[in-house]
Image (cartoon, grey):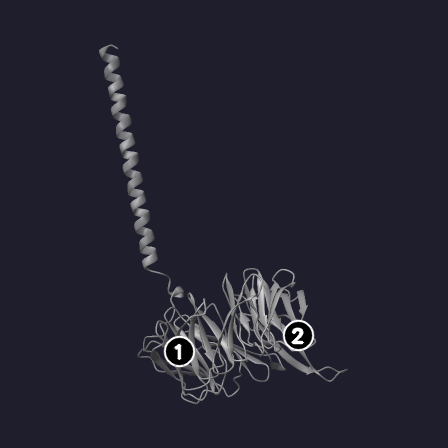
Amino acid sequence: MNNSRRQAFLTISRNAFRLLFFVGALAVFCAQYLATAKSQTVAKPKSNDQKVDLTQPLTLSWRYESDQTLNLTPAVADGRVYLPLARGAIVSLMGVSGQLNWRSEIGGELSASPVADQNSIFVASETGADNNSQRQTGALRALGREGGVTLWIRDLPVALRGGLTLNNGKLFGAGPDGKLYAFDSKTGQTVWTYQHNAPFNSQPVVSGGRVFIGGEDGSALALNETNGGLVWQFRTDGAIRGPVVATDEVICFGSRDGYVYAVTASDGRLAWRKRTGAAVEAVARNGNALLVASLDNFVYKFSFKGARVWKRRLPGRIASQPLVMADAALFMPFSSSSGVVLELRGGRQVNLLPAGEEIAISAAPIASGEVVLLTTEHGLLAFAQPTEKPIAKIN
């Protein structure tokens, strides 16, 4: 190779090396920039994703005053709270401020805890007597988010009880005639029904392609979510009224026979059962453990293997579902004047939310963003971290 060719080859090689070096440096810079941006995004979550810290001081932020509250848990969706009231009324409130959006009068009496999504609020009611049998009939309807106007209505032979559940575009509910329904949430059309031989007064739970519900005859049922076919049935000696806790391995529920049960999710065989001092109507999940609230005034924490972690006495019977956060849970004991917050590692009491009156409503406490909401006999109370703003009263 002569000198001119050698010089040209060396020049091309140096330029190619410089280009490769530049491309490599640019790639490293981009990777570092993207990693930094990602870490900054994770470090600053959106405010809508933040949740209330039950262990911190919480004071009354606003109240909605009404003497028409029911033993039905309000629904929450997209920053709005939907409070069911007597004589077929439901109100929409902003969770952060209590501002009234609308009030809808649908008639009859609301019969099950409502459920909502970003577009609609779904309510079940008991209507007037049937002309032939003189018995109460039922209705299910969807109300629009913005004005509470009826989007669709479905007449039913009897009113749905317990609570409604929304999942995968389907609305689930059950009634005292032993019938469990799956409806299309957009149209109200029936997708399937399942007929049991005993009444239902509980809330369905959907998990892993199955629908779980407890009956007044002590039966726990697992149904196929798609077609309503019975997968398995397990029988206890007391009514099952609260929603179950479903994991991949076990399904847990309480019974009025005084036991809490865990059965295998696949075939409903008994995994374990533990006795409490009275009927159990509320169980809830806390990570890899189970919280059990009993009418014996105690809260229990069990592992999903059945080992008792701790037991804590509260100042009254507990029938409503607790509000469970990452490291604490709020319970509403009957005859007490405050909601009680227990930290979940050891069951120690860490906070109280004063209701201002004796608790006599079994509606569960709920949360909307960083606001905790308690239903009392005289309205809805909203608790948040302390501010200088005066308490807002909404009628």
Residue 257 appears in the rendering: yes
Q: Position of residue 242 (x, y in %)?
A: 53, 75
Q: Residue at x 44, y 84 (%)?
A: 297
Q: Amino acid at mark 2?
A: Gly
Identify the secondary structure beneath mark 1: strand
Secondary structure beneath label 2: loop
Residue at image point 34% right, 77% down: 348
- From the top left corner, tell me how far across and down residue 65 is, in percent: 46, 85
Q: Amino acid at mark 1?
A: Lys
Instruction: Tell me where residue 99 sits by quadrant.
Output: bottom left
- Residue sticking out furthest to the right: 132
Disc 1 packing (10 Å; few <14; some 14–19; many ≥20): some
How far is the residue under mark 1 from the one under mark 2?
A: 35 Å
Quarter in which the N terminus is drawn: top left
Q: Which residue is mark 2?
A: 178
Task: Tell me if I can see residue 95 in this picture.
Answer: no
Residue 273 higher or lower than 296, as above or below: above
In the picture, measured across the screen, residue 357 lies left or right of residue 43, that is right
